[in-house]
Image (spheres, rainbow, N blue to C red):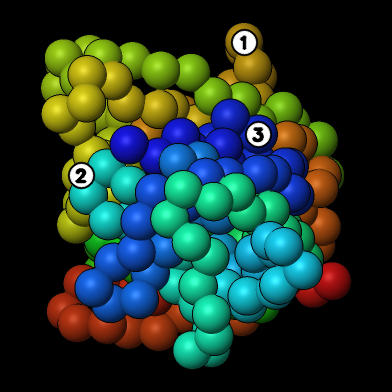
Amino acid sequence: MTRLLFREDAYLREADATVLGHTAEGGILVDASIFYATGGGQPGDSGCLLWEGRRLPIATTLKHGAEVALVPAEPLEMPPVGGTVRQVLDWDRRHRHMRMHTALHLLSVVIPLPVTGGQIGAERGRLDFDMPEPPEDLAALDEALNALIDSDLPVTESWITDEELLANPGLVKTMSVMPPTGQGRVRLVRIGEGAGQIDLQPCGGTHVARTSEIGQVEIAKIEKKGRQNRRVSLTLLG
């Protein structure tokens, strides 16, 4: 099993790991990963591995059972099984994913409708909503979203059991994908605290520590996707 360092500290940019093996597809299995593995609409992280004077670019990161596989960007020499590698994260790309992911949680607050899908990118992200009619005032949504960002709310996490999640189905906003269960506990991401809490939902992704770190955003467009679905695209402005 790979230790998920990105979940322990989303701001960790470098860390050592031991190579556990190689996958048939050419991935590198490690015992601890600062690289986020693709999932929940968030892309896998990129960066590089360093060992014994060698450098291997990593294009993306994937789940491989209970382990994490780092996928090389080029067919270069692989680090040996049992060896130690230094993981170096493409921090700028990851941080933009963190900003966007947290911004999309806020978008689900200003548009309080069931979410049917979503995708995170370094420049643009989107949520699909069960929204029969488009919002009348797009400028008001933009203003409300950026006001929440400017509120500098803390973003924290806690854990509940699988049974507690099943007993509180209202925590799940996404209709199309249920949070992963079966490991005994589920991670919750909270925005705000106490009486100032504005959002609480299951999420395994990486987030900024405070909403002000997101920076200004803009709702780029709203597209009709099916009879009741509408896609709301969000852009980072800086």
Dot 1 amino acid type: Gly
**Residue 60 makes an appearance in the image:** no
Mark in the foreground, 3 or 1: 3
Disc 2: which residue: 178
Q: Is residue 198 left or right of residue 143?
A: left
| Mark 3 or mark 2, earlier in chain | 3
Q: Residues within 10 Å of mark 2 (few under 14, many from 20)?
A: few
Residue 189: x %, y % from top left: 50, 31
Disc 1: which residue: 194
Work out whether residue 5 or residue 207 is closer to the camera in this orientation and state it.
Answer: 5
Q: Is residue 149 above or below residue 122?
A: above
x 71%, y 72%: residue: 54
Q: Residues within 10 Å of mark 3 (few under 14, many from 20)?
A: few
Q: Quadrant of the C terminus?
A: bottom right
Q: Residues within 10 Å of mark 1 (few under 14, many from 20)?
A: few
Residue 65: x %, y % from top left: 22, 49
Q: Is residue 181 left or right of residue 141?
A: left
Q: Secondary structure at mark 1?
A: helix
Work out whether residue 208 or residue 234 is closer to the camera in this orientation and state it.
Answer: 208
x 64%, y 17%: residue: 193
Q: Is residue 217 above or below residue 200?
A: below
Give the label on residue 9, or none.
3
**Residue 176 makes an appearance in the image:** yes
Work out whether residue 86 or residue 116 is closer to the camera in this orientation and state it.
Answer: 86
